[in-house]
Image: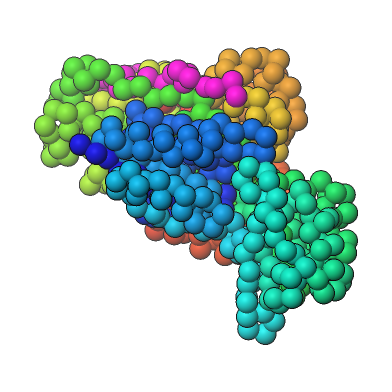
Amino acid sequence: MQGIVYIVGAGPGDPSLITVRGREVLKRADVILHDRLAAPELLSNAPGGAEIIFVGKQPGRHAFSQAEINALMAEKACEGRIVVRLKGGDPLIFGRGGEEADHLAAQGIEFEIIPGVSAACGAAASTGVPLTDRRISSRVTFVTAREGDGASTGVDWTNLAKTGGTLAIYMGRANLASTAASLVEGGLEASTACLVVERATLSVQRTVHSTLGEVASACEVAGIEPPCVVMVGGVTEQYPSAAWFEKRPLFSRHIMVTRPAGQQEWLLAAFTTLGARVSSFPTIEISPEPPERLKEGLLHLEESDWVVFTSANGVGVFFDALDAACLDARFMGGRRVAAIGSATGEALSRRGIRADMVPAHFTGAALLTDLLEESLPGQRILLWRADAAGRLLPEGLRKAGRHVVDFTAYRVEKPSQQGRGAVSALEAAPPDAILFTSGLTVLNFIEIVGRERALALVGRSVVVSIGPVTTAALAKSGIRVAAEAQPHDRQGLLDATLSVLGAQAPQWFDAWRLKTTGKGAPWSESRDNPAK
């Protein structure tokens, strides 16, 4: 059985700019061969067990030659595997996608080419500079100043200067001075406007707006480095008035989130929408109890009047256990349901269950107060929660005459693996803000990073806590808290971070929140309560 190769354009840098089709095939890949400029975050779409091979090139250092890459694609496809060749930008614009397709065709191997947003198009969009504008330029020329192996392309720049329109120059940083001089020699005025865009579409994007006569020295002063795109022509005079990307309130800010994997999506999306670079550094891993143990927990439901969920994690584990037991939501019968935090309530709603009670404040104390008001002495209450949950809730309920089954459905553990490379990367580019969402995230962060390194890292950042329990854990660890979320949820965490960084969300962001939280209510969940 023979496989297939997908030659996929990963886009200009921002991982969200890959096409829907490109993301779909990544999710089905058995093997991924990826370039240096393909966003690493895209690899998270790979299914578990997929073979991931770095085949990137940069001047003077090649992981694989082009011939070796061609052979590797063919070899993996001949093994009957689905191969994704993930390339930065668009594979057919200075991406050698044509060479790779030719090799596959010669070998009789099926392939599909999936286009991507090219680097020049990405740079134009993120700077607000059109490559063509009927008032200024009706022509655009894409040209590369260097080949992928670093060799000069031998472009006749003096003749190219006579073509008119907009020039979009790829890989133009190394020879920028000579390129600019040749364009002037060919007839362009030294005063011709140009724009150099480094790492376009990313929060670390930098731009130099200059003229042909001065652009090389301006880039030296600014320290502009590859990868970058050089745009030459009158259209670039629209910068910076048309710029939007760099005007976002958190542009160029680096924020680190320590929430567990799978619980970061809303925060990551919110911060990215506001222009920040977000690093995910999960310090907690959720491990459900074994199936037989969870089945025992479900049996307690039959004799309970209430079932209490203290996190969205617990909801997920509960319904997975129901499914494993060939049951569904009907098994809950007429039991009343309580949830702490609206994210837990939302998780239940997605399963067809509407919580009878969600306390106004997302803390164990508030949940205890409301449960005592709603339940009756002698009633049986099943707490479906984590092993690290605090004692306030069960002890308070028992003291008030309720029968409590405190069932451990999942364990909150330190991640089994956290690469040293991730820590080194954070040290090389310290976050502007580090967000902690529970006392356990604090303890695990210090243990993973090492106490001295952790204190040094947070000393170069502002620290934002989700609430008083987390703040106390940070203080006990000798870490100063710059801001605490109010309320103690994800939206409060976002607002506290904006405030401490001296930024303000634009008016349109309220509409974004409404669309992403649903019904105008905060899609949020505190990790700052001991009930979990």
Q: Which residue is drawn at 70% across and 27% down?
A: 427
Q: Quadrant of residue 179?
A: bottom right
Q: How is the image coloured?
A: rainbow
Percent position of residue 17, x then y: 50, 54
Percent position of residue 261, x then y: 45, 32
Can residue 4 be seen? Answer: yes
Quadrant that contains the N terminus = top left
Q: Which residue lies furthest to the bottom in this view?
A: 135
Can residue 389 be seen? Answer: no
Range of residues picked out in magenta:
398-421
Q: Residue at x 67, y 34 (%)?
A: 60
Percent position of residue 200, x then y: 64, 54
Q: Nearer the viewer, residue 323 or 147?
A: 147
How many discs mark residues in the rendered view? Answer: 0
Residue 285 in the magenta stretch? The answer is: no
Q: Which of 21 and 371 is in front in this view?
A: 21
Quadrant that contains the C terminus = top left
User: Up-down: is 166 above or below 370?
Assistant: below
User: Up-down: is 57 above or below 128?
Assistant: above
Q: Is residue 519 left or right of residue 334?
A: right
Q: Which of 48 and 169 is in front in this view?
A: 169
Q: In this view, does 153 lie to the left or right of 176?
A: left
Q: Which residue is drawn at 82% across and 56% down?
A: 178
Residue 418 in the magenta stretch? The answer is: yes
Percent position of residue 435, x then y: 60, 34
Q: Quadrant of residue 30?
A: top left
Q: Which residue is drawn at 51% across and 50% down?
A: 96
User: Up-down: is 528 above or below 18?
Assistant: above
